[in-house]
Amino acid sequence: MTPLVDRFDRHVTYARLSVTDRCDFRCVYCMSEDMTFLPRAQVLTLEEIHAVARAFTVLGVTKLRLTGGEPLVRRNILWLVRETARLPGLKELVLTTNGSQLERLAGPLRDAGVKRINVSLDSLDAARFRNLTRVGDLHRVLRGIEAAREAGFDRLKLNSVILKHRNEDEILDLVDFVVERGMDISFIEEMPLGLVDEHDRALAYYSSDEVRRDIETRYRLIPTTETTGGPSRYFQVADTGSRVGFISPHSHNFCESCNRVRVTVQGRLLLCLGQEHSVDLRHVLRAHPGDDARLRQAIVDSMAIKPKGHDFDLSRKVVITRHMSVTGG
């Protein structure tokens, strides 16, 4: 099949697959406290998710990321990991998690074929962590991170969303944490997805430039051309084995080099995180079961509507009404 190339000559080699909209946390920037989750019939089965993963790899995608919600609360997730990791042409299977289930699953995930893990962690203060996640236990997550370190993944990385007046005073503590453990960290500007009631996103906005300024009061950051295939701009922390990345949808738009698409747990192939251009892969899967060629063609055809980029604007109340938990983190 023809590789996935959009109208702007960008080659899509990376797909993010959401395996559930459910999560055992209720992070303030991700979802409402009282969430209504999708009925099971609207959610792709694990077999359907695997069929989508297989179609992408046949089309030249070399990196797949499993996301949620929280992917590790999906029943039989290890089956999907094992089967996906075996797909011909796949160079890297990675996973993003909140860390709550890693204490018991880190080893099995590594054995099943996950190469790298990103752990979402926005605070090292137990009370603040619970406030930000509404229900999370920081110590359980920290034990999970240690279990992942012992499991021997290629790299471990923290993802931290920084909010003004909520956790910007912990930026240096988070960098210290990863430097001490030989891990990496990416700081993420909040994505304006879904209605949240905990804060005004415009007032809580803390830019990547501000984060970098704070880090450089203690550490020297060396620009690097390294990439993990995603949107982070990486800097080496001088005299350490750690890297700091910045994901900056507002202050440093990364759309020109976009090489990725994502599939929601409902089977919507989203061509852009910040736009609604999409293709209904669930309909293809269920109207034509087992027809891999038709599924691949639907993905190829989707390249014609992949937009040039998003248009996030914090002055608007909400840009996209779907929550990040539904979109796939």
Image (spheres, helix red, strand yellow):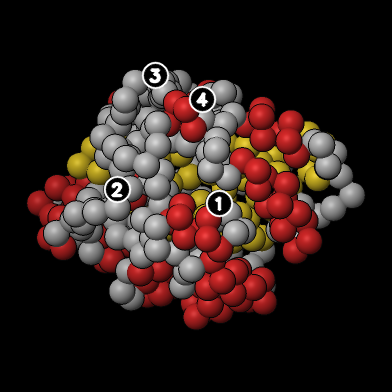
Label 3, label 1: how far apart the Cα atoms are: 24 Å
Query: Which amino acid, mark 2?
Result: Ser
Residue matched to label 4: 250
Residue located 62% across and 45% down the image:
186
- Which one is in front, 318 or 49? 318
Among numbered discs 4 and 3, the one appearing first in the sequence: 4
Residue located 48% across and 45% down the image:
14
Residue 195 is drawn in which quadrant?
top left
Query: Which amino acid, mark 4?
Result: His
Position of residue 131 in the picture relative to residue 187 (left or right) = left
Q: As displayed, is residue 263 above or below residue 257?
A: below
Among numbered discs 3 and 1, the one appearing first in the sequence: 1
Q: Are marks 2 and 1 in contact (CB under 8 Å)?
A: no
Q: Is residue 227 visible?
A: no
Nearer the observer: mark 2 or 4; the answer is 2
Badge 4: residue crowd in 10 Å (few <14, some 14–19, many ≥20): some
List x then y, in percent, for residue 92. 55, 57
Residue matched to label 1: 122
Nearer the observer: mark 4 or 1; the answer is 1
Label 4, label 3: how far apart the Cα atoms are: 12 Å
Residue 310 is drawn in which quadrant?
top left
The numbered dot on residue 315 is 3
Say what secondary structure mark 4 lies in.
Answer: loop
Badge 2: residue crowd in 10 Å (few <14, some 14–19, many ≥20): some
Q: As displayed, is residue 147 above or below residue 232?
A: below
